Image (spheres, rainbow, N blue to C red):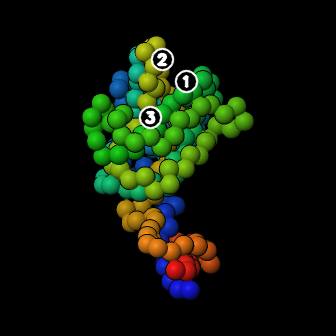
């Protein structure tokens, strides 16, 4: 039997969305500017200038452009207090392409309003990309609106992979600290 210890850095708990730029397919009014969703203010009240909103349109989208390629571990989305169903069936895409307004990138999740909470967390497990898109793919006119988007991840690799030919690997976590993990790999031939 062979044993290897691997040390790898885990995802950052810094909200990298704050360093990005937000745009959207249209803007409902000055109350609903795209950048309101990444201003660090999670206030769910529309009248407080803390939420983004597109106009009523088919296939609305909102995009965050990060200052570089990041590996995204999770995304938190805060909905509005009112008109919460506008978050239903919203797809989240992460990648580096601007084709189709970045809506052709790999999908991380589909979210819906959760009546029990205003803020939802989705895991993206290290998906890499510079663009994070929220997209309603329906031909029916509707607005896309939410009050805060937080993106956690980092520029460093989140996962390291070990490929073993002709053997069986066992992954055993030994220690998890604030930013580092030690993993023990064991296999036999």
**Label 1 crowd (10 A; few <14 / some 14-19 / many >=20):** some
Disc nearer the start of the sequence (3/1): 1
Contact flag, marks 1 and 2 (Cβ < 8 Å): yes
Q: Is residue 41 left or right of residue 54?
A: right
Q: CA distance from mark 3 to mark 1?
A: 12 Å
Vertical order, 169 against 28 (above or below): below
**Residue 49 appearing in the image:** no
Residue 28: where, in percent of width, then height? 42, 21
Q: Residue at x 55, y 24 (%)?
A: 86
Q: Are marks 2 and 3 in contact (CB under 8 Å)?
A: no
Give me the C-alpha separation between circle 1 and circle 2: 7 Å
Residue 35 image position (x, y, % from top left): 40, 38
Residue at the image position 35 percent from the left and 46 percent from the top = 95
Tell me if 112 is positioned left or right of 62 in this view: right
Specify the label residue 142 is tagged with. 2
Q: Position of residue 10 (x, y in %)?
A: 50, 67
> Toward which corner of the image does residue 138 lie, by quadrant?
top left
Q: Give the mark nearer the N terminus: 2 vs 3.
A: 3
The residue lying at 62 percent from left, 41 percent from top is 119
In this figure, what is the number of numbered marks? 3
Q: Which mark is residue 86?
A: 1
Can you identify the residue that label 3 sits on? Answer: 134
Q: How crowded is the residue under tag 3: few (<14 C-alpha within 10 Å), some, or many (20+)?
A: many
Q: Quadrant of residue 178?
A: bottom right
């Amino acid at each position: 039997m062979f044993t290897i210890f691997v040390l790898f850095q885990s995802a950052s708990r810094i909200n990298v969305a704050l360093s990005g730029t937000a745009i959207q397919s249209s803007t409902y009014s000055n109350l609903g500017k795209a950048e309101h969703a990444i201003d660090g203010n999670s206030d769910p009240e529309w009248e407080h200038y803390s939420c983004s909103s597109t106009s009523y349109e088919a296939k609305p989208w909102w995009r965050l452009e990060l200052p570089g390629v990041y590996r995204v571990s999770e995304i938190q989305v805060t909905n509005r207090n009112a008109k919460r169903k506008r978050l239903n069936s919203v797809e989240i895409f992460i990648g580096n392409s601007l084709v189709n307004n970045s809506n052709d990138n790999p999908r991380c999740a589909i979210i819906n309003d959760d009546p029990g909470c205003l803020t939802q967390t989705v895991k993206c497990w290290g998906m890499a990309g510079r663009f994070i898109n929220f997209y309603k793919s329906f031909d029916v006119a509707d607005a896309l609106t939410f009050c805060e988007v937080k993106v956690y991840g980092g520029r460093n690799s989140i996962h390291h992979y070990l490929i073993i030919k002709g053997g069986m690997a066992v992954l055993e976590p030994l220690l998890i600290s604030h930013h580092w993990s030690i993993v023990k790999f064991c296999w036999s031939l």
